[in-house]
Every structure is written in structure tokens, then in C-alpha cells.
Amino acid sequence: MSVFDNLVDQEHVVEIIKKAVASTRVGDQRFEAPTQSMTHAWVFTGPPGSGRSSAAVAFAQALVCPNDGCGTCNQCKSAANGAHPDVENIRTEGLSIKIDEVRELLARVAWAPSMGGWRVVVMEDADRLTESAANALLKAIEEPGSRTVWLLCAPTLHDVLPTIRSRCRHLQLVTPSTAAVAQVLQKRDGISPQMADFAARVSQGHIGRARYLANNESVRNTRTTIMKLPLTLKGISSAFAAAQTLVDLATEQANQASDQRNEKEVDDLSLAYGKGATGRGMATGGSKAIKDLEKEQKTRSTRMVRDGLDAALLDIATFYRDVMMVQAGSNDALINKELENEINTYATNTKPHTTINKINAIMNARTNLGHNAAPLLTIEALMCVLAR
């Protein structure tokens, strides 16, 4: 058992991390100065689902674990669930990480390690740092504490401020193979071979999404609806209808995921400020705290809608990718084998350069959504292009 067991098809990254951890244990002296295999700042990059955050967390676990990442001790477990006093796991459910959050973080990591030899910061969304927050983080990385390690995660190096990435060691993760993901689903989660193959194939190597698809029939039904949208595009009216359907599905999924959670968060915060207790009710500052929480919840909901749309656009892109494969004379590597007949018909009735243009349009729409473009307008414009 090891903290690295969950990293699928990332043997090259695991080897580097293990060597870095081993270099901190030279001469069996736990706090001896590290060798050149270890450095104070790392950046993990890779496509969605490759496990870049999992790799960073596993690195943190191995550094604070007395057995180099056994996965079973209290240090490993607490580092994984965010309860270890020497491990900061920073993730955001909003649209960005702001400078105030970074300043609070820097104040905390200035302390010396309390239990082990390292204080480790895992930042799962380094690509969401605002410019001012990134500059504040840069100063800390330029002048690191002697026992502080920064583990930043981002989709690509270009998503990280150049001055930050130039001071970090880079680890590039790859998309796991379909066979490897299917094997993990079968062995670890008890998924049937047929369902594991389907989930691994349509998730394109994204282990978390593959597991989610395999275990949720409603999610699979939603995906089926999304995948049939390209077949409904016959003109402007159908394009607008498809856009509305896509936005409604993303909004519904976001609301289902957040409504119950939002209510519980408000109730818990109200109780913390004394609501329902005898006396005067909520303590001073309670109303403001709840308003701030509701603002954060709204931001989180906005991101969830955009993330849902992005995932849907990636699914639709696989349809046109399969069409392009058929047009190139290759029917053996289809992602959406369940739609093979429809894909073959579509490929016969369209030209290859049109298919490429549609894939590019989808990628541009994803970029625009990432730049906070209005979701419905963006999807409507895209569907009009796809309907041509």
C-alpha cells in the first residue's frame, strides 16, 4: 500500500517524487538538508483527469509520513483529508484565488513545521490566481522558508505566471490510457467490465469523471442527451434550442449539486453565530458573515455552471472527432461507439474541412467561457456555427 497507488500511468512522475523524498532522508537524519533531487517549489501540469492534484497531495503525504508515503498512518490520512497541521491544501470553488487569500496563506506558512520536517502547501488551482495574488505568491517562492515546499497545480505551464514557473521544478503528467482507467474502475470500484470500458472511453482518461459516469445513471442519461444535440442542428431555430438545452442542463446539474449544500452551510454558520440560542440571537457580525457566504456560494454556482458547460462541450467535441476519424478512413478508434451509425451517416454528408472548423469553434467557445463570456450567448453563437 502506498500513496502513489492512485496515480495511474504516471510512473515517470512517481519515480521523480520518490527520489526527491528519499533525498530528504539522507543518512537517516529526517531533517538533514535535501540534495539537488529536492527543491522548494514544484509545478504539476497535465490535462484534466491526469491526476496532477492527486500527485501533489501524494508528494505532500510522502514528505510528512515517517515511512515515505505508506498511505495508512495518521500523517498520510490527515494530509489527504486536510487535517494535517503542516499541510495546507488550497483549492477554490470560485472563479479565482484573490490576494487576500494568498496573504492569509503566507502568514500561516511562515510558521515552523509542528509535527514533521516540512510545511507543505498544495495549491490545486494555481491557474486561477489573480495577477496581484500571483505576485504576492512569487515573493514567497523567491524567498522560501527553509522547511517549506510549494506544490502548484495547473493545466499547462502557460497558465502559471512566467516568473513563478521559472522558479519551480516542472512535472508533466499524461492522460492515462483507456485500458488503465478501466482496470482501475474494475479493481478498485467493482465496476463491471462493460461499464468500465464505456466510462473510461467516453471520459477520455479522466479517472474521476469515469467513476462518476459509471456510478450514476442520471449522469449517463444527461450525456446521451448532450451527444444527440449535434444531430438536431438543422438551422438557426434548432441551434438556439440546442443552446438553451445545454445551458439548462448545466444549470440544473449545478443547482442539484449546490442547493442542499448551500442551505447546510448557511445553517451551520448561523448556529456558529448563535442563531436559535437563548438570548439576543446571532452575535455581532453574523449577518455580514452570512451575506459574504451567500456571495461566495453564488460565485461557486457560477463556476459550476461554466465547468458543466465546458465538460459538455468536450463531449460534443468527441462526436466531431469521431466524424473526422471516419472521414479519414479509421473506424477502429471511435470514442462514441454507441453512435457509430449516426457518426457514419454524418461523416458521409459533410466535408472534412467543415468538421475541423466545427472542432475549432468548440475549442474557441471553451476559451471564451474561461474568459467569463456570457454562457448562453457563447453557446448560442457556437451552435449557429455547428448548424452550418
Image: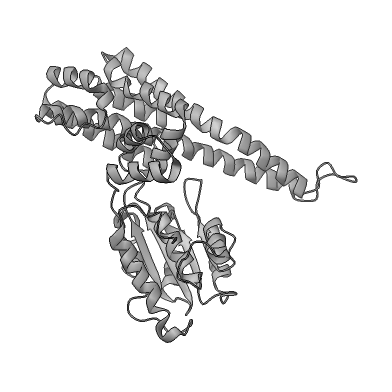
**Image: 96 above or below 105:** above
Residue 337 image offset from top left, x and y in percent: 25, 27
Examine the image and state in which quarter residue 20 appears.
Answer: bottom left
Q: Residue furthest left?
A: 329
Examine the image and state in which quarter residue 111 appears.
Answer: bottom right
At 57% across and 69% down in the image, what residue appears?
Answer: 107
Residue 120 image offset from top left, x and y in percent: 49, 68
- The residue nearer to you, when weighing 72 against 347, is 72
Inspect this view and state whether residue 134 appears. Answer: no
At 61% across and 38% down in the image, what residue appears?
Answer: 261
Left/right placement of residue 295 relative to residue 221 reads right
**Image: 220 above or below 269:** above
At 9% across and 30% down in the image, what residue appears?
Answer: 328
- The residue nearer to you, when weighing 55 against 189, is 189
Q: Quadrant of the N terminus?
A: bottom left
**Image: 274 above or below 197:** below
Left/right placement of residue 105 relative to residue 228 reads right
Q: Residue furthest right?
A: 279
**Image: 197 above or below 1:** above
